[in-house]
Image (tube, rainbow, N blue to C red):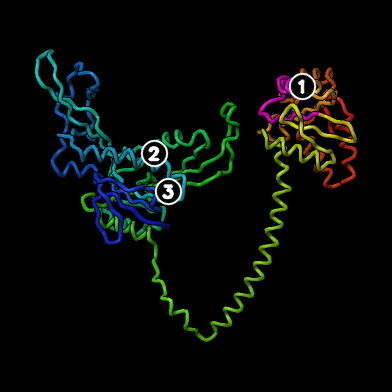
């Protein structure tokens, strides 16, 4: 766990950036580790005697408030309080919690670590004065929601108020942290986890998959401390297609958000100190520069041997790098089976060129033309998550007409389609999932247009790697074949 550490809460320590909840905060993304003492939020108001339980009369009254005021008319829970005389510092706490939530949403995508001294949420209402004339005139006070003490949190997970003494450690690295605990006061409900903030922020580009693991539990395996993280998976569908599946392998693993109880909410300094020590790790004292001038017997021989081994490793690494580069280049052509758009078009062009066709640009479209022994054909490439449609074929027919008009050449047309591209190859071209439906085949037959699936093109390319002489037969089928071409 590297990087600077920031503590937000009532804490003061040498060499530590620390801020109270009501102070102006620095940019959280400047820090690799955050420690949030959220117990201070409730205590800041409660210890000052500024919180009170809503009066019974205020719970039961129903009325029409002044414009813009939404009164609290439901019966308050035991974890609800009213904050008297809301001031600028109170507003700053509320603003900081909103800002922290937004920043944590961004930071959880990256390798950041957030430790939270956590306590179940308490709803804080503020008193609002307003004038009314009915049923009795005068100035009246009502309470409206001001803030929840866990409004800073980018995830939502319910807690159940219950207490017990036995604590079972799941993550042994927290053994020292829990040594002073007399017991536990609540547990988390993992099934209640929601990540709406993360889904809203990342949803257009990634599927966010949450992971919530227990750090410690009670005797019934109910978690009393948890670690949240998220995996970010690329969507399997295109931006212009309806939402579909997502890649099984995550594109990125995010940071961690650790929610921990405290043995004493009124004295959290030892908990903060322990987390600081964990965040910093074991710090070594760097040697002064003059130490390098001192040599121990046998040191020179070891240095020489290390240098020799390093040169051998570098030579091997260079060879491996070249082999990996060749492997990546070879595997790139698997994109014929799943890709779409401009990248699929380029892969098709390269494949046809490697098979012996000579590609050249089209004067009427962003696709291309191939020349095989003097016979030319205009290529249309489509990658879709369903069957090739009449509209896909219609585009090629239009482009052929435009080419004839612009050049006077009546050339062949070939539609190369990657249909059902998100499915495994053996699940395509079935009775209910044809690559080229009969209506498309019929139109192609009438217009003397060839149809080639990218799965067939991929097969032909693989055959050419095993038997280069197969290229001639493949090219002959491409330029002389009819309707749906198979290799």
Describe the element under mark 3 as helix, strand or loop.
Answer: strand
Q: Which residue is mark 2?
A: 155
Write down the region rendered in magenta: 378-395
User: Looking at the image, is mark 1 or mark 2 earlier in the sequence?
Assistant: 2
Q: Which residue is mark 3?
A: 256
Q: Residue furthest top?
A: 134
Against 416, residue 441 (above or below) is above
Please report the residue visible at 68 percent of the width from the left and 65 percent of the height from the top.
316
* Gap in angstroms between the C-alphas marked 3 and 1: 57 Å
* Gap in angstroms between the C-alphas marked 1 and 2: 56 Å
Please report the residue visible at 21 percent of the width from the left and 41 percent of the height from the top.
89
Describe the element under mark 2 as helix, strand or loop.
Answer: loop
Describe the element under mark 1 as helix, strand or loop.
Answer: helix
The label on residue 319 is none
Against 82, residue 410 (above or below) is above
* Eye-nearest disc, 3 or 1: 1
The image shows residue 318 at horizontal and vertical percentages of 68, 62
Against 462, residue 61 (above or below) is above
Mark 2 Cα within 10 Å, few/some/many (few <14, many 20+)? some
Asked where in the image residue 471 lies, by quadrant, the reply is top right
The image shows residue 310 at horizontal and vertical percentages of 62, 71
Q: Are marks 3 and 1 in contact (CB under 8 Å)?
A: no
Residue 388: in magenta span: yes
Quadrant of the frame with the C terminus? top right
Q: Which residue is mark 1?
A: 402
Tell me if 229 is positioned left or right of 161 in this view: right
- The one of 265 and 329 positioned closer to us in this rendering: 329
Note whether residue 159 is visible.
no
Mark 1 Cα within 10 Å, few/some/many (few <14, many 20+)? some
């Amino acid at each position: 766990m590297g990087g600077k550490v920031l503590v937000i809460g009532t804490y003061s320590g040498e060499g530590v950036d620390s801020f109270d909840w009501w102070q102006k905060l620095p940019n959280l993304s400047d820090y690799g580790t955050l420690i949030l003492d959220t117990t201070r939020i409730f205590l800041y108001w409660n210890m000052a005697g500024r919180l009170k339980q809503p009066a019974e009369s205020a719970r039961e009254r129903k009325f029409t408030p002044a414009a813009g005021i939404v009164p609290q008319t439901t019966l308050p829970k035991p974890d609800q309080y009213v904050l008297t005389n809301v001031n600028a510092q109170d507003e700053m706490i509320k603003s900081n919690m909103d800002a922290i939530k937004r920043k944590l949403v961004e930071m959880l995508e990256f390798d950041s670590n957030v430790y939270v001294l956590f306590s179940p949420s308490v709803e804080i209402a503020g008193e609002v004065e307003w004038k009314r004339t009915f049923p009795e005139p005068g100035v009246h006070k009502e309470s409206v929601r001001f803030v929840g003490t866990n409004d800073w949190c980018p995830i939502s997970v319910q807690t159940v108020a219950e207490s017990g003494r036995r604590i079972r450690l799941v993550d042994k690295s927290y053994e020292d942290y829990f040594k002073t605990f007399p017991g536990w006061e609540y547990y988390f409900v993992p099934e209640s986890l929601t990540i709406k903030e993360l889904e809203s922020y990342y949803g257009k580009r990634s599927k966010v998959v949450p992971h919530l693991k227990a750090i410690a539990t009670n005797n019934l395996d109910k978690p009393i401390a948890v670690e949240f993280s998220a995996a970010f998976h690329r969507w399997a569908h295109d931006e212009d297609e309806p939402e579909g599946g997502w890649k099984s392998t995550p594109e990125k693993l995010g940071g961690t958000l650790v929610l921990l109880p405290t043995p004493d909410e009124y004295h959290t300094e030892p908990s903060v100190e322990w987390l600081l020590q964990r965040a910093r790790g074991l710090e070594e004292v760097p040697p002064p520069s003059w130490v390098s001038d001192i040599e121990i017997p046998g040191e020179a021989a070891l240095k020489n041997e290390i240098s020799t081994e390093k040169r051998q490793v570098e030579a091997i690494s260079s060879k491996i790098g070249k082999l990996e580069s060749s492997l990546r280049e070879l595997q790139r052509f698997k994109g014929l089976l799943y890709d779409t758009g401009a990248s699929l078009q380029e892969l098709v062009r390269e494949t046809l060129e490697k098979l012996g066709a000579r590609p050249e640009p089209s004067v009427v479209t962003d696709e291309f033309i191939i020349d095989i022994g003097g016979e030319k054909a205009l290529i249309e490439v489509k990658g879709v998550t369903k069957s090739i449609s009449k509209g896909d074929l219609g585009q090629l027919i239009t482009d052929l007409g435009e080419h004839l008009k612009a050049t006077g050449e009546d050339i062949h047309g070939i539609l190369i389609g990657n249909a059902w591209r998100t499915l495994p190859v053996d699940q395509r071209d079935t009775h209910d999932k044809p690559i080229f439906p009969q209506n498309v085949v019929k139109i192609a037959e009438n217009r003397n247009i060839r149809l080639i699936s990218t799965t067939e093109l991929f097969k032909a390319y693989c055959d050419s790697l095993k038997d280069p002489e197969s290229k001639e037969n493949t090219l002959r089928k491409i330029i002389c074949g009819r309707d749906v071409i198979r290799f």
